[in-house]
Amino acid sequence: MIKFTLIENSLDSIEQGLTFLSKAEQDNDRSAYKHSLLCLFQGAELILKEILVLIDPITIFDKNSLFKHCASPLSPTMEELYKCKSIDIRSIGQELKKHYGESFTNSNIKVLDKLATERNKIQHFAIEISPEDLTKKLIELYIKVIKPAFKIAQSGEYNEEQNGISLSSINERITEFEKVFLNVKIGDEFYIGMCPSCSEHHHFIIYEGESYPIHTYCISCDYQLNDLNLSDGAYHICPDCSAPSLVYDEKHKAGVCLWRKCYYCQEGGFVKMELCKTCTGYAIEGNCDDCNPDE
Ligand SMILES: [Zn+2]
Ligand SMILES: [Zn+2]
Ligand SMILES: [Zn+2]
């Protein structure tokens, strides 16, 4: 069995990159911006290779190189692979489109290519780029490349023994990254509750400029609530905290409270909530306020 430790190295690089990025934003430090780009890009490259290795380890190696160094190029030994050249970032993009076309469309690949160019500028030509522009591009890299790759790594057939790190500790680290990233992107306009679907405390509830949450997502599973600002009357009174913070989740046919201090938001999960059989309102914990206001 061929052993790769790409995922751990990738997490280390991304952690460093995000630390540099926070520092760069805080102190307006040019060298921190540069290091942030180098680390985040390297981390992205490694996590992308990791998900390609899940398809087949030879995917990430240059085909000519495999034929040159391996007795049987389709099932090489580890010793042979050490001599082989791995594929460059453009080929990584092509392989991603081929194997993970749903998560990596042209627009995702474009972000990767753009950042590759910026990385080369810094590395080989020592060209400086404007901090505002770079931050914008790094945020794009995180959202459109690193996060979809994490999703694939987290949901694929995960082999703890081979990776030397448990899936739950990977999830914890990814949650920490998301906090740092959101602090850079939107300051403190978010908080974290328990995901009603998977029960992990990885449910990110995002305000982003509003006085109420506008969308949410879980880092550990696919759970999310979107466009809460668009649907008028999206919020109802929660039976536990009495705040107008209860949202009806169509898919799960249940309520979700998004008030950070509410029991349901932090520990309780779904609230019993269904469409009222009599009026157009909702029955929350068995009672519709519009039909029975006094109960
Ligand atoms: Zn979840
Ligand atoms: Zn509540
Ligand atoms: Zn009713």
Image: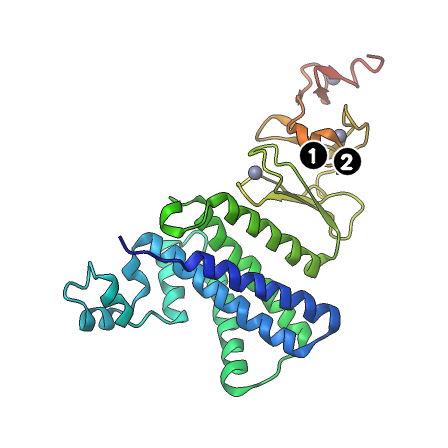
Q: Position of residue 292 (x, y in %)?
A: 80, 13
> If the image is split into quadrants, where does the C terminus sit?
top right
Is 74 on the left-hand or right-hand side of 58? Answer: left
- For disc 1, the marked residue is 266
Q: Which kind of residue does numbered mark 1 sit on? A: Gln
| Tally of marks | 2
Residue, x 26% and y 52% (percent of image)?
Answer: 1
Residue 223: name its quadrant: top right
Using a 10 Å C-alpha cutoff, classify the residue at mark 2 as few (fewer than 14 neighbours), some (14 to 19) or many (20 or more). few
Q: Which mark is residue 261?
A: 2
As drawn, which residue projects farthest toward the left? 71
Mark 2 vs ligand 2: CB below 8 Å: no
Residue at the spot x=41%, y=59% of the render?
6
Q: What amino acid does circle 2 point to?
A: Lys
Secondary element at tag 2: loop
First-in-chain label (1 vs 2): 2
